[in-house]
Amino acid sequence: MRVFKVCLLVIRRRMVMFATYFIIFIGVSIMLSQFSRQSYNSVFEESRPAFTVINRDKETIYTEKMMDFLKEHGTYVPLEDDMEAIQDARFNEAVSYILIIPEGFQDALKDQKPVKLLENMIQDSASGYQMSSYVNQYWGYIQTREKIEENPDREKIADEVSELLNRSVSVEKRQYLKTQPVSEGFKAQYQVAPYIILVICVLCITSIFLSFQRPDIRMRNLCGPLKPFTRLWQMGLGCSCVGIVFWIILTAAGLFLYYDSVKDMDIRITGLILLNSFIMLLLAMAVSVLASLFVRDTNMQNAAANILALGLSFLGGAFVPISIMGDSVLKVARCLPVYWYEECLDEISGLTGFGMENLLPVWKCMGILLGFTIAVLCVTLAVNKQKSGAEESFGTAKTEIGM
Amino acid sequence: MDMFWNIYSKRLLSSIRNKDQLIWIWAFPLIMATLFYFCLSSVSQSDNLESVPVGVVTDTAYEEDQMFNQVLEQVGSGEDAILKVTEYAQRDKADSALEKGDIDGYILIRENIPQLVVKQDGINQTILKSFLDRYVQTEGNIRSIMEKNPDYALDFEEIMGGDTLTEEISLSSQPYSPVVNFYYALIAMVCMYGGMQGLTSITYLQGNLSALGARRMMAPLGRIRVIFYDLLASATVHIMSLLFLLFYITVILRVDFGDRLPLLVLTCLAGTILGVAFGTAISCLTKLGENMKVGILVSITMFCCFGAGMMVSGMKYIVDQHMPIISWLNPAARISDAFYCLYYFDDYQRYCQNIAVILAMAAGMFLLSAFSLRRQNYESI
């Protein structure tokens, strides 16, 4: 098993680089999980858009009660009445909705042409629409009451409107599984996992191939007593071992980080997510072997790893959810394996049962991913056959030692 | 002049022929910009208001509630309908559609009050709940008005909130774009990668780091002049790569960066000077091997770009709000902010502050490097 041992030696020597990538990935996934909601709640929770209110009018019971009402439905972000601060907050999405109460607004409520409230939101945005409709509803009720009463008592009107706005319908949140659904943090980690799987696999496998492709080593091996098949078999075993060990570490890290939520999930769902990531690993290994046939030095190796991983992950929906991609991009994405990985992850996360009807889309996506893997392997074999017969097969392969 | 041209042209050629730099400074940003373009172009529409698919169980209770029936028909019809209503004769069927994800929720009438059934939390489900809440609240409002003043002429538009009390205003002459910050952070990253040029220049000038450096140390030339010519060539190559990236983003990809082109170029120039100064400082202030220095440079660049919002949108704003000093000391954040000011603000005050900070940082780094290189000699190489 000399070749196998050499494979492990090559990996050991580049361990610092792999560890750096892995640690950065874990750091990013922990950070991503902070942005997603951690715990599952069986009671319905409203989406709470971030909003701010700039009051240039008087502070009255009306504005006080309006703030209480809006805070029940949104997240209040206090901002000073400064144009630059407001613009900054809006552009950087710190607030989805800005309401400015102009001077004299409350006193002009009964007028035929009342002073208008000023608002800013993303055009056609759902969260902006929602907050705007709350504001209109609140002031609409106040306005009607002011109009029907001769001498309106503001405190009484504000209390009545608040009481009215406290009425709400009951919402039942259906849970189709007995266990909790996939936690957002755990899903986020597996959503971006194709990037790290691809980077590490390409770096590991191309490192192994680079070492064996050096012309002097290759010529020596060809006239050595080891059969080419045995050498290839041991190289394959080395690559597989490295890939599987990495996958185990990745899985262990995921389970460790999200233990609290994973323990409450259905074990079959966890199993399917891990199976999906394992198939992704197989695909990444196939892609890496194909890349090894073209990588000639370490510069190219780093570039290939990053460009392949970033390209496939970005377009496949690992960083930007598939749901918000444009139609034309989706057409391209469907031709990429990472898209099917992400699609499968979505299907698994949305499972409401384990019957054949429920699982069929999951198996379909996994089947397509496996099909991609086989196709890439076939291409690799064809390219290898063509390249090994070509004149340049002993060309100038460079490693850091060779240089 | 001959010596200037000799050093300048050789450094230009060697930079252009450096494959490593070609990949990371020329090709990689273009690929990233292309990926941003394709994947982020629809991000601005992610929160778009679309008709929410909702089911309604048309049992006897529903049929009897004529008022709700009419309201639902009204909000579910027309081109700008808020709801896309599907009727289900039995609850089981509505439940099955909800499970499959065909609808975001379904409505039931129980004791003349609508109830909502959903599968998960979300903005669509919130819109459904707020619609139903509004229905029961408006019903209560009408009842209370009628009790108080039976003679009051109820205006249906007024009661249903058709007559809005709000007016939308614009905050800037430029349209809001959630993706330009990613491009700004990308350009800031390339500016910081100018450090590779500065680092290479110093490596080729230090006798303990390269054979070329050892030879140049022996040459009968003033060190400051050699460094200046060399860094000038490095900055020239780098600004070319930045301008090419700017051209690619604004002309080929047609991303709107505003119409202040000369100032965009000025920002690129200031960023390049800062980037080259950054690499020079790292190379001069550390006594490590070249690969280690590149590692430090790339790590600091990535960290700064994270703070500038390259990985998470709005990160620059968050750091600005909670750690303003760190944000002002982050070179990538200043470069990105300078581009943002040019795009979004009508005045130049904050832009000028950013450029002043960038140039001050660059001057500080060059000064530190100069002090470190001054009268440097080697006992043995």
Image (cartoon, grey):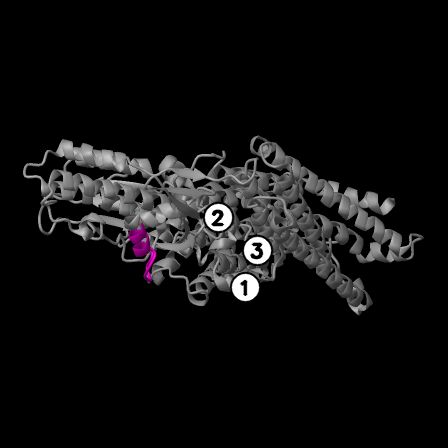
In percent of width and height, residue A3 lies at 84, 47
Respond whether the residues carrying marks 1 and 2 are from the same subunit.
Answer: no
Element type where label 2 sits in the image: helix
Q: Residue at x 15, y 43 (%)?
A: A143
Q: Quadrant of the N terminus of chain A?
A: top right
In the rendered structure, find residue A194 and report the number of the disc placed on it: none
The CA distance from mark 3 to mark 2 is 27 Å
A91 and A210: which is toward the camera: A91
Residue A63 falls in image quadrant: top left
Q: Which residue is mark 3?
A: A316
Q: Amino acid at mark 3?
A: Gly
Q: Which residue is mark 1?
A: A331
- The residue carrying pointer 1 sits among few (fewer than 14), some (14 to 19) or many (20 or more) residues within 10 Å by Cα, namely few
Which segment did they paint magenta?
B69-81
Circle 2: residue type: Leu
Residue A349 placed where, x, y %? Answer: 56, 44
Residue B98 is marked as 2
Kindly identify which chain the residue marked by label 3 belongs to: A
Q: Are marks 3 and 1 in contact (CB under 8 Å)?
A: no
Tag nearer the camera, 3 or 1: 1
**C-alpha gap between disc 1 and disc 2:** 27 Å
Residue at the image point whose x is 59% and y is 36% from the top: A265
Instruction: Name the amino acid type tagged 1.
Output: Lys
Spot occupied by residue A47 in the image (x, y as percentages of width and height): 39, 41
